[in-house]
Image (tube, coloured by chain):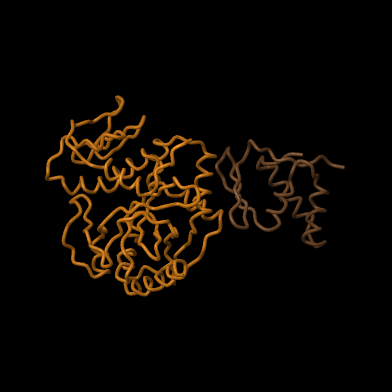
Amino acid sequence: MSAMPPGPREMLALLARETQVRAGPLMTALDGVAVLPGEQRLADGRYLLVGRSGFSCFYRKGEGVLLGGYSPEHAGELALYLVGSVHAAVACLNGLLPIHASAVAAGGQAIAFTAPSGGGKSTLVTGLGDLGMPLFCDDTLVLHLGAPDAVHALPGHKRVKLWPEAMALTGREPLELVSPDYPKYYATPTAGDVAEPLPLGALVFLREGPEPGWRRLSGGEAIAAFADDHYTRKLFDAANPHSRAERFALHARIARQVPMFEFTRPLQPARFRECCAFLAGRIAAITGP
Amino acid sequence: MTLPIRKLADAFTETAIDEEVVVMSLASGDFFTLEHTARAIWLLIDGTRDRAAVLAALEADYGPEVDADEVDAFLASLTVAGFVAA
């Protein structure tokens, strides 16, 4: 008799435990390979990140994150890594799949938006929050693939990070700077956040276009679009070695189980609210009863 | 009588999504999305049918307006991709 694989809630709890931080030695190399400031390395089930300011975050399964060489003046930089790169690496090493996406909750499902950096993911989920959709995560979405018949998403963040222009666009006051090296500001979502895993109801690829538009991707388009997310690919591949065929099978499975869409919208600030309302209508159509 | 067309299973991996078959070259990682007649031809290639039998089966499903030249061009593209051989 084989044990049931851990479900999304168990994995969420595990991720919370495994990302706990405690003091450790300063490390600048993994397996004899130097890791320079601002770089990371994952090998043989271990992960090392060296921050730009020189502190290190080391992780090995079951041991949490060891923080070395840290001083509190770099709290902003550390916080950024802990919700970004370190979070993604710990997820990868525990069999989860992080992707570059922000998400809201709607109709008991997570609706995720992906685009290259600066593509408007955080701004959009903030705008959808103003329309009543709680924040599910910002910038990194962790997927649980343990159930064969569905893809679940694990909630990740309580706040979004916005550039000053996006703060103005969404009507927020720039109160807390993320980091001097990364001058975004934290913003609290209007509709609150989500603490429980949810089925991933849709993955939406953001594009710029002259008018708001919405289109379901075909199977081949969905696989190709999903395969184009390189944000955490190296980490995932290093943590979970697999062949090209196995990767294709994984992407195909996700494309079969998660409807994927393309949302095209103009980026003029004056049309932001109109685009959010358009998008909210499409989300209601796919998540409604 | 020509030789049966067979798939070269070591050269690709495939998956069905909705009404499509997506085939990926294991050598290059390139995708090929097969829909409609292309999907039908792909599914008819089973190692027993030759070109004439594939065409006949297609005509049985789609009618006599099936364009034999297009079928030949598609079979040639599959051969060039390394997915099939006769």
Image position, residue A272 (x, y; %)? 34, 71
Direction from residue A18 to residue A141 in the image, left or right: right
* Residue located farthest toward the front when viewing the structure as drawn: A1
**Chain (brown):** B
Image point (59%, 48%), residue name: B15
**Relative to A86, residue A111 above or below:** below
Image point (16%, 58%), residue name: A176
Image position, residue A35 (x, y; %)? 27, 32
Direction from residue A11 to residue B86 in the image, left or right: right
Image position, residue A122 (x, y; %)? 31, 60
Q: Nearer the viewer, residue B77 or A135?
A: A135
Direction from residue A71 to residue A241 in the image, left or right: right
Image position, residue A82 (x, y; %)? 25, 45
Q: How many labels does the image show?
A: 0
Q: Which of A168 and A112 is in front in this view?
A: A112
* Residue A110 falls in image quadrant: bottom left
Q: Which of A274 and A268 is in front in this view?
A: A274
Please identify which colour was used for chain A in the image.
Answer: orange
**Relative to A92, residue A43 above or below:** above
* Residue located farthest toward the right when viewing the structure as drawn: B1
Image point (20%, 54%), residue name: A178
